[in-house]
Image (cartoon, rainbow, N blue to C red):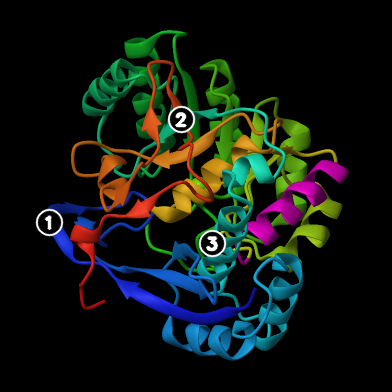
Amino acid sequence: MKITEVRLVPLRVVREVGMLEPAWEPGASLHVAQGGGAVVEIVTDEGLRGIGPAAKGRVLEVAQATLVGQDPRCVEDLFERMRFAMRNQGGMSGVDIALWDLRARIEGVPLFTMCGGGRDRVPAYASMIRLGDPRERAAMARAVRQQGFRAIKLRLHAATMREDLAIVEAVRAAVGQGMTILCDANQAQSQGQWQPGVRWDFARAKATAVELELLGVAWLEEPLPRYAFSDLRRLRDEVAIAIAGGENLRLQDYAPMLAMGPYDIVQPDAMVVDGLTGLRRAFALARNAGARIAPHHGGRGLGTIAHLHACAAAPDVPWVEVLHDPPVGDFSHGFAPFFDAPRLDEDGCLVLPRGPGLGVQVDPGVLGGTA
Ligand SMILES: [Mg+2]
């Protein structure tokens, strides 16, 4: 069996939903639609197809040159060839995910089953997008709990620690102990020093960590800059709450990061570590270093579905992250272009599709966009 084509399939916007201001980038707006964008499709000489999240034109050119004529079953080998051809510049995650989808379709089994997974649903946490205010976020927490979610991740981006804590206190009062609360300060957005919004120093990170622990928050995420590994390690040693992070790190950053022990919980993202191959390798590196794993995912379509499979195949992953800030940021909008998309059950778990590969198909009615 050989790969004959790697192409981008544009999707039509079937419904404009609206705009959201993400807490981690004040002043920006996140456009939400059902459909739009594109998927990567890899085709074989036997007519089988694998799909993954969109990739840029340059990546597709490299993938065409590297993958056409190769056996699609050799995913790890093709990952290495793609990484070399891309000169380690990233951007190939959609191609790698499409290769994994294709390989499981060739075997005729769900991807999580092929990867050794023993569970067909994974607890999901509702990851907030907007900052909101205490009253509004408390109502949101109650609403997502009623939808089934048992965990919520709040954004800490207010001017003062007092205002951040007011949101967490209001949510805790609203949901009691019936929900796990996670908090994200998104202080590692920048590769360098500057990023929009409030910047925390060590003192604010530590003071916030102490207060959140008293509120029973399960982890504090990205309280310090991306590469502040020694300060993060010191913070970990000085506070009781778990410190989480790593969503912005490339695969090659993982070994040096883990050697310094900055995080209790590491959060690789398939879209940053070059796909599911990189994600599985990051999981293994983290386990070897004694860190816990709770992968990050900031996408809303096939990337989330790919993460769900990776989480189902990793019994030590407690949660799959799902961006969900209804109504505009409802997770279902990202799944709308696909048939057989995962559904949320009454226990707050995302249920894996039963079909081969990622288990989802592009709705033919969404084909034909111009992305
Ligand atoms: Mg985060």
Report which residue position mark 1 lands on. Answer: 16
Residue 203 in view, yes or no: no
Q: Quadrant of the N terminus?
A: bottom right
Q: Earlier in the sequence, mark 3 or mark 1?
A: 1
Residue 301 in view, yes or no: yes
Looking at the magenta stretch, what is its main secondary structure?
helix
> Looking at the image, is mark 1 or mark 2 nearer the viewer?
2
Q: Is residue 48 above or below residue 2?
A: above
x, y percentage for residue 91?
53, 74
Q: Earlier in the sequence, mark 2 or mark 3?
A: 3
**Mark 1: amino acid:** Glu
Q: Residue at x 77, y 57 (%)?
A: 257
> Looking at the image, is mark 2 or mark 3 nearer the viewer?
2
| Label 2 secondary element | strand
**Mark 2: amino acid:** Val
x, y percentage for residue 51?
46, 63
Magenta stretch bounds: 274-289
The quarter of the displayed image where residue 109 is located = top right
Q: Earlier in the sequence, mark 1 or mark 2?
A: 1
Residue toward you, 275 or 363: 363
Q: Quadrant of the C terminus?
A: bottom left
Horizontally, residue 289 falls left or right of residue 186, namely right
Report which residue position mark 3 lands on. Answer: 271
| Label 1 secondary element | strand
Q: Is residue 156 above or below residue 11?
A: above
Horizontally, residue 145 falls left or right of residue 203, namely left
Horizontally, residue 45 falls left or right of residue 125, namely right
